[in-house]
Image (cartoon, rainbow, N blue to C red):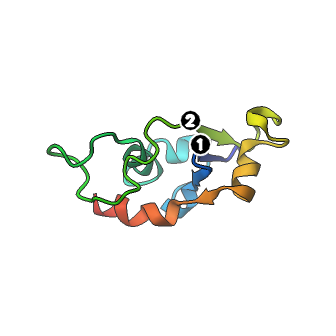
Amino acid sequence: MGQYYYVVNLDKKQFLHPHKFDEGLKLMEFGCSSEGTLTALALLLADGNGRGGGDAQSSDPLIGSWAGDRIVVAGDYADAGKYGIAGTLHEHAAEAYEDISERMLPIVRSS
């Protein structure tokens, strides 16, 4: 057993689900990977992609779309009542936010 996490964007009401990237949900299962959840997060946070060598070879509008937003790596054991919601952010995201993992997969794999 252990704590399971999603990467959650509070402003866009979107999240990344590590299982969709064939990774575990525990922090150190997806926190040490390549071409997975954290690569997707880096692409979402990138400001200025496509202007230099080593950038992602994609013009998908998702790249950079989280730059400047409030991002939380939300655990299912986190304190309830934060962020103006009744339960945990992990629960709330799964129920009410958009999982953009499937949309990010081809971008991650082509980068």
Q: Which amino acid type corresponds to the residue marked 1 in the rendered image?
A: Asp
Circles 1 and 2 in contact, beta carbons < 8 Å: yes
Secondary structure of the residue carrying tag 2 is loop
Q: Residue at x 67, y 47 (%)?
A: 4
Q: Residue at x 62, y 42 (%)?
A: 10
Q: List the residue tagged with mark 1.
A: 11
Q: Position of residue 77 (x, y in %)?
A: 76, 39
Q: Relative to 45, does residue 62 appear above or below in the rendering?
A: below
Dot 1 or dot 2, earlier in sequence: 1
Q: Which amino acid type corresponds to the residue marked 2 in the rendered image?
A: Arg
Q: On residue 70, which mark appears?
A: 2
Marks 1/2: CA–CA distance: 6 Å
- For residue 45, side relative to residue 58 (left or right): right
Secondary structure of the residue carrying tag 1 is loop
Farthest residue to the left: give it: 53
Q: How many marks?
A: 2
